[in-house]
Amino acid sequence: MVVKVYGPAYGCPKRVLVCLIEKQIEFETVDVDLFKGEHKEPEFLKLQPFGVLPVIQDGDYTLYESRAIIRYYAEKYRDQGTELLGKTIEERGLVEQWLEVEAHNFQPPIYNLVINVLFSPILGVPSDAKAVRESDEKIAKVLDIYEERLSKAKYLAGDFFSLADLSHLPFGHYLVNQTGRGNMVRERKHVSAWWDDISNRPSWKKVVQQYKYVV
Ligand SMILES: N[C@@H](CCC(=O)N[C@@H](CS)C(=O)NCC(=O)O)C(=O)O
């Protein structure tokens, strides 16, 4: 059974795509156009009642929330493809810790930037300069903490690439390549080396090449 992933052109679904590639799981994609409001149509809401991307269908199993999906596949196919959860319960704890940091500290201010810097002009709505300034300040503080962590470990959870690192790829890409803030990463030696390492993985390069970002 091939996994169906909805919305490959956007950031959060790319988190799922890169995980499926690392885990060597076959999938197909279904386009959903956020700018046309397809994610708010009744058929889509039957799958994802909150009207956001992604959602996956795996046979008759439906799952949404990108980080729930990647945890599910990393666990289900533990012995297939890249091991993404750590070998010990302590390693797993650190993977979970950094997944939470990504979800609550890293992605939200970058998401705000993406809305205000990239989406607002397309939608023809004014961008909120205060929100942009506050997001920049939050991202700088978060990256200072990452710099400290990555000066002691090659990856966020230790010396192994994990779901925690993988989860940063879609919005790290927005930060470095789409919102003109690559300097925030480049100014921090260890964050910069980490970003080069994870974003050069064949899995992520394939996602970026085959499922182009809409903006
Ligand atoms: N916590 C959710 C967030 C989903 C989310 O915000 N998705 C964005 C795309 S990255 C979206 O669909 N936005 C459309 C909207 O908010 O209307 C997840 O990780 O799956």
Image: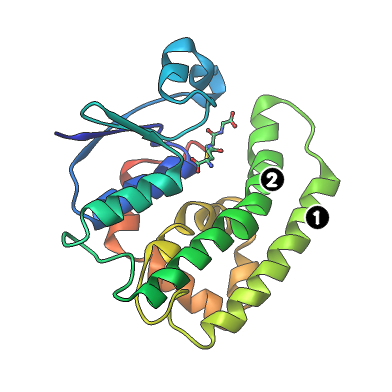
Q: Residue furthest top?
A: 42
Tag of residue 112: 2
Quadrant in which residue 5 is drawn:
top left
Disc 1 and disc 2 in contact, CB within 8 angstroms:
yes
* Quarter occupied by the N terminus: top left
- Number of labels in the image equals 2
Q: Earlier in the sequence, mark 1 or mark 2?
A: 2
Quarter of the displayed picture in which ligand 1 can be seen: top right
Q: Is 25 positioned to the left or the right of 12 in the image?
A: left
Disc 1 marks a residue whose amino acid type is: Glu
Quadrant in which residue 197 is drawn:
bottom left
Query: Dot 2, how many residues are within 10 Å of its Cα: few (below 14), some (14-19), or many (20+)?
Result: some
> The residue tagged with tag 2: helix, strand or loop?
helix
Q: Is 104 positioned to the left or the right of 74 in the image?
A: right
Q: Residue at x 69, y 33 (%)?
A: 121
Tag of residue 88: none
Quadrant in which residue 149 is drawn:
bottom right
The image position of residue 180, as x and y in percent, is: 63, 56
- Determine which residue is flagged by label 1: 134
> The residue tagged with tag 1: helix, strand or loop?
helix
In this view, 129 is above or below 50: below
The image position of residue 111, as x and y in percent, is: 63, 46
Q: Residue at x 43, y 82 (%)?
A: 154
Whether residue 83 is visible here, answered yes or no, is yes
Report how far apart the C-alphas of labels 1 and 2 lie in the structure.
9 Å
Whether residue 206 is visible here, answered yes or no, is no
Q: Residue at x 39, y 61 (%)?
A: 163
